[in-house]
Structures are given as C-alpha cells and as structure tokens.
Image: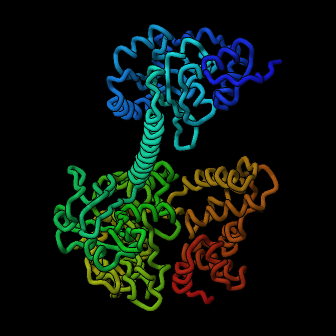
Amino acid sequence: MYTQSVKYVKDPLWTWKNFVERGITDAVVTRPEIMESWQRCRVLDVDPYDGIGKDRLGHSELQQLFISNSQLVEVAKPFMHTVYQSVQGSGFMVVITDKEGRILHTCGDTGILDKAASTIQFIKGTNWSEQAVGTNAIGTALVINKAIQISGPEHFCQSHHYWTCSGAPIHNYLGEIIGCFDISGPAEYVYLHTYGMVVAAVEAIENQLRKEVIQEEKNRAYELLSAVTESVTEGLLAVDNEGRIIHINLAAQKMLRFSHKNVTGEFLNSLLGSQNNLTDMFVHHPWKTDAEMVLELSGESIQFTCSSRPITQGDGSISGVVFTLLEINKVRRLVNRMVGATARFYCKDIIGESEVMKKALKLIFVAANSRSNVLLTGESGTGKELFAQAIHNHSGRSDGPFVAVNCAALPRELIQSELFGYNEGAFTGAKRGGNPGKFELANEGTLFLDEIGDMPIELQVNLLRVLQERKITRVGGNKEIPVDVRIIAATNKNLLKAIEEGRFRQDLFYRLNVFSIHIPPLREREEDIELLTMYLIRVFSESLGKQIKGADTEFLQAIRNYSWPGNVRELQNAVEFAINIAEEDYLTVKELPRTVVSYPRLIRTEGKVISLLEVERITVESTLSQFNGNITQTAKALGIGRNTLYDKLKKLGVRA
C-alpha cells in the first residue's frame, strides 16, 4: 500500500515521478481527474515509460473501422479542417477517434503529424485508450465522459510528456458516446482556447449529427409514405391552396391519364380544364366523402368516387386538399365480389347426355363467341341461370361481373331503381349519396334478366332504350351514364302470346331474341334423369355428411316414371329430401317425396292414359293438400317458384 507524502512538491514532473516510482500522490499539484486516471493506469498495469501505440489494426480491419464510422468521419471532417485553419502553422494537429479511442482521421502541420507517427505511432487505426497508452486527452475524456485538457507530465506515460492535448467525447442523439475530438501539440504551447475550440467543435458535430438523424427519419418517413401511397389501389392526389399538384401517386396518374408525364407542380385546371369536378370540390367542398363524379379525359368519360380532406397547418389554417379517387368500375367489381355477383358454372358443369340436351349445350359456345343478346326459354327449373353463367364464363366478358336479376321477384315499384339506380333524394327513403343500379354493377360484364316476361309493360320501354343507346339515367337524375353490358334474358312464358295479349312489347322481344336457346324440360330428356340423380346423390351425400352409395332399382324406376313438372330443381329437392331421411347405404323408394311415388299409381287408378296437364293438376292438388294450402311450402316441395305456382294454379283451375 502507498501512503501520501507529507512534503508538497510544486513541480508536476516531480509529482509524476513520485507517483510512478513510489505511488505517492499530491492532491495540491495534481488535479483529481488526472490522479484518478493515473490510479486506473496503475490498476491496468500500463507501463509509464512506454506509451507508444502498439495496438494497431491491419488493413482489412482498418477498412472495416472506417466503414462502421463513416457517418461520424464525414460529419466531423469539415469541422476538423475548420479548427485546423485556426491553429495552422503552430505545430498542432486535429484528431477524430471512434468510441474505443481508435484514430479515424487526422489533419495538421506535416511536421507535427510526422513527429507523432514516428515517436509514439499516433496514426490511423491505433488504439489511444487509457488501457493502451495511459492518461491522455482522448482515452481519459472517453472514460470520464467529459472534455479535458492534459499537458506534459500530466500524461501517465513519459513519451507523451512532450505533448499537450485537449479532447472531448462526441455523443449521438441518444446521448451515447460514439467518438472523441482532440487537438494535440507541443506542451510548451498549451493554450486554454484550444480546449474551448474542442468543446465548440464537438457541440457543432453533435448538432450536425442530430440534423442528419432527423433528416434520415424524414427520408424514411417519406419513403414509407411513398411506399404506402404507391401500394394502395386508390388514386391519391394532393394540391396546394393555389390548385397546384404537390403529390400524386401512380394509381391517380393512371386514372387521370397522366401516366406518361410528370405533373407535380402543374395546376389542376391546366390539366383537366377549368370546369372539372375536382376543382369545384377543392373550392367549395374540401370535406367530402364518396362523391360520384364524371371526368372527360382524353375523349372518354371516366366515373369516379372521390373523397376530399383539407391539409391543415398547426394554426388550423388550410394549406391544400388531398383527394382520394376510385374508379367506379373497381368499386363495382368489389361490390360484385362481396355480394357474390359472379358466375360459377361452366358448360362442363351442366349434366346431360340426351340428344336434345347436347344440341342445347353446343349453342352455349356459339352464344359465348357472339356479342348479341341471348334469350333463354324453358320451363321453370330447367337450369336457365346455369346456361347464362356458362355463356358468360366462356365469353370474352368472363373477367367481368355476372349480375342476375329476377324480374318476377322485384316489387313493381322498385324494378326501375333496381335496374337503373337512383340519385340522392329521388324518393322517400332513398339512400344518401344515391345507389347504382344493376346495369352499372354489371358494366363490362353480363346482366342476366330472369323471368323477363314478368317485367311491367311500362318499364319495358326504358329497358329497350338502354339496349339501343347503351346509356342509363338514374331515377331522380338527368345525367346519362354509359354502360357496356351484355344482356342474357330468360323466361318460362310464351312471349309471343304475351305480345298478342299486349303484356310484352314486340320491339323489346326482337331486341332480346337475337340469339335464342331453348332448354328442354326434364320429361323430354328421360335418359338424363338417372344420370342427374346419381350425380346429385354424390353431391348431397358429401354436403350433408352422409355415406350414400347409390339407389335401388325401385327408386330409379319411380324417378323415371315421374313427369317432373318442376324439372331439375324439383329433382334436386327430391334427392336432397331422400338423403336427409335415408338410414341405409342405398336410397329406397320409401325416401322419395309422396308426390313422386304416387304418380304411377294415379295412372293405374284411372285405368287409362292421362294427359300430362291432368297429371300436373293432380300433383299440384295433392301437394297443396299435403301442406294445408301453404303456397311457400308447396312451391318448395315441387321445386318451383311462388309466382310459377300461382300461374299453374290459375292455368289448372286449382283453388289455393
């Protein structure tokens, strides 16, 4: 253990010798920071008679050091050279190190740089920490985390007594030490102002580093914002208070037909014309949500929904407006996907090997390759919508929507608004912002008008006009909206008879009946009945979780003998009913609905051939009686719609 000397010696060199040779400290002559550093050096076993930088990096390690500290060096260099300009010619040099004390860059008078390199190996890549070379402004400043000036014998190692140095740690924006700034020169030229220059330089470097971090964060934020705006399908457009474009993403450029030129800085009016809707929203409606608009762009009319939001400053003032644009066609496609307005069936999904069915199926491809309107005729339940979907899916419009409308199911007063849409305020209860009709939703696709024979006569003229002009006008509106729609209509009625009775327009019939396909009833395709039955058994067994392997002979005989007035739909219902109640692996006749099983018995009871019309009357009467006159349950059991059942009751003279 060392004891403190009783005699105080004022000579710093003598104080140093007393410490390194005898461990005696002098608190009067030696500053606490220096004494604490000397004590650390003794603990670290630093040789006080050495101090030459021996811990140096090789070439590859040195390159890696420069790479990992490149930002610090690039920021510090200008300040280093500015400081050097103040001490140039006085034998001083300026140094920057990393957080470990390894020298990164030096600048100074040639003589002093050479002397430092030759005498103490003070060169790039050398470790100048306390542990490596003892007490010095670089290593000690990094340990105590504050600026310090060390001169002559205050250095722990004797080879450094020639030098005076001022060093200060450099911090990043988090307050972490990332390096050290140092000014070194001969000890006889020790000046207080060099210490002040170091402190000022470090403060400037740290400020610049903070600015670069802030700028990097801004750049990252901008890159993130750009990535987000470019990734969305909506068009984003921002304009300043003067109507000048300050930002536009790629989607908006394409929508507004600007994709081949840089329009940032251009005035909106000069690009779209002074009467464009966007300028009107910018001036009068900076807050707007999902407003519909039409822009005339490059000779074509483009429909959009547009939302606008003002850009507000810190003081609440508005400095511009951001528009969000979405083409109506994209909105419609999204709506159609959400509501299932798609066609699932292809020609291969329609079961039938009979000759009459083969002929009908061939016409699907002919119709698909044509642009003409199609009229599908056939009894209820024959599969007219399946044919319509197959025509759509095999046509050039298969990527577009398939929208189906049952004209018989819509209330008479709502058909027009359902087909053509309506504007806000068109009638009591009209939805805010209006609503597009089926024609708009089916744009660039197919509109299937089922039960077209039930469309009210007064609305048929509107439909005819749309078919002729390819434009619609919403209820309550006066603006024509162009539509590109292929029409497939279907009916189970005799339209020629309806024309004679004044219930259907002849000109509309000829517009729809450009290409006609008649779908035969199930009773005319007997060879398909068993084929369909076996297919339906597989489908319903899987969906209902049953292990039904097939049907017995009596079951198949019963379905062949039945006339199936509800056609394929009634057959589907019968098979589904049978599978639901089946308890064995094979369906038996006892699982069939009563109407199907009783049909052959009715013929035998009469003892003579009965007309199909009479069989149909008996079937309808017995089913109606079975369900106690309930129209909905009777129609479902027969596999037909309510309106079709009402027609049959009227035709057959059966009272409900």
- Expressed as whole percent of the image width and height from the top left, the position of residue 295 reads 24, 69
Q: How is the image coloured?
A: rainbow
What residue sits 45% from the left and 55% below the top? 357
What residue sits 34% from the left and 19% below the top? 109
Judged from this view, the residue extending furthest toward the bottom is 428
Q: Is 112 in front, or is 57?
A: 112
- Expressed as whole percent of the image width and height from the top left, the position of residue 307 reads 38, 70
Location of the N terminus (image quadrant): top right
Residue 311 visible in this rendered orientation of the protein: yes
- Expressed as whole percent of the image width and height from the top left, the position of residue 226 reads 39, 50
On the image, which quarter does residue 363 sit in?
bottom left
Location of the C terminus (image quadrant): bottom right
Q: Is residue 367 left or right of residue 190?
A: left
Q: Is 616 in front, or is 7?
A: 7
On the image, which quarter does residue 476 sit in?
bottom left
Residue 231 visible in this rendered orientation of the protein: no
All told, the count of numbered labels is: 0
Q: Is residue 128 left or right of residue 355?
A: right
What residue sits 60% from the left and 74% below the top? 615
When the figure is inspected, residue 650 is found, relative to residue 330, above or below; the finding is below
Q: Is 199 in front, or is 449?
A: 199
Q: Is 553 in front, or is 105?
A: 105
When the figure is inspected, residue 256 is found, relative to residue 126, above or below; the finding is below
When the figure is inspected, residue 216 is found, relative to residue 408, above or below; the finding is above
Q: Is residue 450 left or right of residue 473?
A: right
- Expressed as whole percent of the image width and height from the top left, the position of residue 410 reads 48, 81
